[in-house]
Image: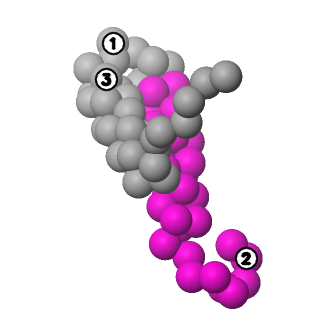
Amino acid sequence: MTERNLSDLEVYQHLARTAEELEALAARAASLIGDTALRTAAQTVRGMATAVYEHSVAQPGDSGH
């Protein structure tokens, strides 16, 4: 069985870092298609990071979390 040892904060940090890397790659893309694909991927990953962050800071009893 795989050991789980990444905290929600670490997951958030990895996702945020990945989004930044994708944005940096987009700035270097040779075509509009590549730029758009990388920026879209960065936005998606950043959205996942935000969701993890919001979930991890939600207080028990908050509605919607």
Which class describes the residues within 10 Å of circle 2: few (<14), some (14-19), or many (20+)? few
Provide residue 12's location: percent of width, then percent of height. Answer: 43, 49
* Residue at position x 48%, y 39% in the image: 5
The mark nearer the N terminus, 1 or 2, is: 1
Q: What residue type is labelled 3?
A: Leu
Provide the secondary structure element on which disc 2 rests. loop
Q: Which residue is denoted by mark 3 in the rendering?
A: 25
The C terminus lies in quadrant: bottom right
For residue 30, which numbered disc appears in the image? Answer: 1
Relative placement, left or right, of 44 versus 6 is: right
Which class describes the residues within 10 Å of circle 3: few (<14), some (14-19), or many (20+)? some
The mark nearer the N terminus, 2 or 3, is: 3
Q: Which residue is denoted by mark 2 in the rendering?
A: 64
Tell me if I can see residue 12 in this picture. no
Relative placement, left or right, of 40 versus 24 is: right
Provide residue 59's location: percent of width, then percent of height. Answer: 57, 82
Provide the secondary structure element on which disc 3 rests. helix
Provide residue 23's location: percent of width, then percent of height. Answer: 34, 34
The mark nearer the N terminus, 1 or 3, is: 3
Q: Which amino acid does label 2 sit on?
A: Gly
Farthest residue, direction right: 64
Relative placement, left or right, of 64 versus 21 is: right
* Residue at position x 73%, y 76% in the image: 64
Coloring basis for residues? one colour
Are the two marked residues, 1 and 3, in contact with CB atoms closer than 8 angstroms?
A: no
Residue 52 occupies which quadrant of the picture?
bottom right
